[in-house]
Image (cartoon, rainbow, N blue to C red):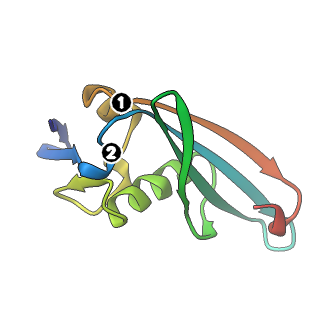
Amino acid sequence: MKTTFHLNGNIHTIAPSNKLEGVKAIHVKGNRWFQKTYGNTYHKAYISVLIDGVWHDIGETDIQYGYGDQYLISAGEWLIENGYIESDQYSGYYATRLNFEQLGIAFSYTTQDVKRKRDL
């Protein structure tokens, strides 16, 4: 199964790979840290999947610069890089809640702001 969507006048597709077979839901936990000295925000995303009623942690991103919900884009790119999603573009922008739901996979996320870099 694949989903097709329009973005900036172009048609794109994403599809789950065999690695997502049996997955009912994906959850992304984003940790953000604000570096007060320079005013930068960094994040790390942790990705989990629900299979047969049990949550499994499948991976995490490296620490990256980005604020707000940027960790969702990083998680989407991680899913593409690690072969969980087949995409015609290398962009985590396509791994969204709407696209996952069209594939029959529930998508949720939470965010936590941490005080120290090592807590990412």
What residue do we see at 33% from left, 54% from top? 84
Q: Quadrant of residue 77?
A: bottom left
Circle 2 is placed at which residue position?
20
Quarter holding residue 55: top right
Q: Position of residue 116 (x, y in %)?
A: 87, 64
Identify the mark at residue 61; answer none if there is no mark.
none
Left/right placement of residue 116 relative to residue 76 reads: right
Q: Amino acid at mark 1?
A: Ile
In the displayed structure, 8 sits above or below 36; it is above
> Where is the N terminus found, in terms of image quarters?
top left
Gap in angstroms between the C-alphas marked 2 and 1: 9 Å
Kindly check if marks 2 and 1 are in contact, taking CB atoms under 8 A apart as contact: yes
The spot of residue 53 in percent (x, y) is 51, 27
The residue that mark 1 highlights is 105
Where's the C terminus, which quadrant?
Answer: bottom right
Percent position (x, y) of residue 39?
Answer: 78, 66
Mark 2 or mark 1: which comes first in sequence? 2
**Mark 2 surroundings: few (<14), some (14-19) or many (≥20) residues within 10 A:** some
Task: Answer above or below: position of 37 versus 92.
Answer: below
| Direction bottom: furthest residue | 38
| Residue in the picture at 70% in, 52% down | 31
Mark 2 or mark 1: which is in front? Answer: 2
Report x, y in % for residue 111.
68, 41
Q: Secondary structure at mark 2?
A: helix
| Front residue of 39 and 81 | 81
Identify the amino acid type marked 2: Leu
